[in-house]
Amino acid sequence: MSAYPQTTVMDTSSRESYQDAITVEQFKKSYGPHTVVDGLSFRVHRGEVFALLGPNGAGKTTTVETLEGYRKADAGTIRVLGLDPIRDAQTLKPLIGVVLQQDGLYPALTAREVLHLFAGYFAHPQNPDELLERVGLTSAAKTRCRRLSGGQKRRLALAVALVGNPQLVFLDEPTAGMDPQARLATWEIVQELKQKGVTVLLTTHLMDEAERLADRVAIIDHGRLIALDTPENMMGTRNARSLRFVAASGLDCSRLAAALPSATAARELRAGSYIVETDAPENIPALIAELASWLRDQQITLSELRVGHGSLEDLFLRLTGSEVRE
Ligand SMILES: Nc1ncnc2c1ncn2[C@@H]1O[C@H](COP(=O)(O)OP(=O)(O)OP(=O)(O)O)[C@@H](O)[C@H]1O
């Protein structure tokens, strides 16, 4: 309940000068002897969708919950909408929306009752019934929370986070447990939030979610920042000098490289996963055309083709050495 306080009168004058929606500088947090966040620094611009990626235990939830004011930093500076999340909690809480990893919704209330209840905490809430429809829960509006499926609970938690028209939304694994249709609907909602200028900080284990939604992605491991960039830059899509493709394993790469005039080299990275290199980004369109016609002539079926280093998932594995879990 503490996440959704009674509406307070806000003094926004002290916040007018803040530049970024979130500032984290040299943030440190330990549990006993165990350091889980170790000098983390990043900024989230206003109106940006920012994704935090990291393997299990990397410190993502600790970071997000500190930004939300639920945990206290041991060291460093944390500002959210120009405010200190603990000292200025009363002012900040009505301005942010939070989807927690665990949904602490009331088991005996219906989905509609929960949303109306939370709407009552805010001065200018969204229409709860319209919001229920927006998250695809109209048919479950009269279902008690304990009977909602895992995916429906996540959608209700999202609606609860949005009902107060927040300026900044924290989404901790927002689509975990959702079926593909609900996931797509949630992605649309995040894109709408961005269009409205709402800042979104999300954590996810789904690389396609980060690739599709995020303006910038921070990869953290052992509580440290190891990469921060746009998904395109991380994947090397711009100024790329290579193609990756997936097809049957065991293709003759020297024959392949020799057959493509724009290629300088070709290798099988792992069974069925190939890289073809060229010496300048402007050769990429020709390389794609040459590769496509070679594959056609050899009657080889292609299951994936990417420009650049590979997927965000490849990069994540390379940087953290960890498997991604859903
Ligand atoms: N209250 C706590 N007391 C002690 N240890 C904790 C506490 N909360 C988290 N930890 C530990 O801190 C580390 C970082 O946890 P955190 O939940 O921040 O990671 P995460 O990146 O969100 O992981 P996940 O992807 O599994 O959610 C983990 O080793 C976790 O066990």
Image: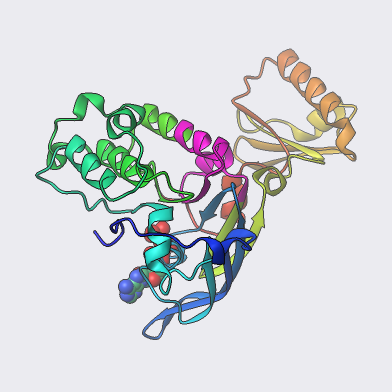
Q: Which residues are magenta?
A: 188-216
The question of residue 133 being in magenta is answered with no
Q: Position of residue 136 (x, y in %)?
A: 31, 27
Along the viewing direction, whichever of 126 and 257 lies nearer the viewer: 126
**Residue at 41% across, 29% down:** 185
Residue 270 appears in view: yes
Q: Is residue 159 left or right of residue 46?
A: left
Quadrant position of the N terminus in the picture? bottom left
Q: Is residue 32 left or right of residue 285?
A: left
Along the viewing direction, whichever of 247 and 130 lies nearer the viewer: 130
For ligand 1, give the image quadrant.
bottom left
Picture quadrant of residue 113: top left
The residue positioned farthest toward the bottom in the image shown: 33
Picture quadrant of residue 184: top left
Q: Position of residue 7 (x, y in %)?
A: 32, 55
**Residue at 26% across, 50% down:** 103
**Residue at 67% across, 48% down:** 230
Q: Image height check: is 207 above or below 15?
A: above
Figure disc tally: 0
Q: Position of residue 60 (x, y in %)?
A: 46, 62
**Residue at 57% across, 35% down:** 195
The question of residue 194 being in magenta is answered with yes
Q: Is residue 57 left or right of residue 115?
A: right
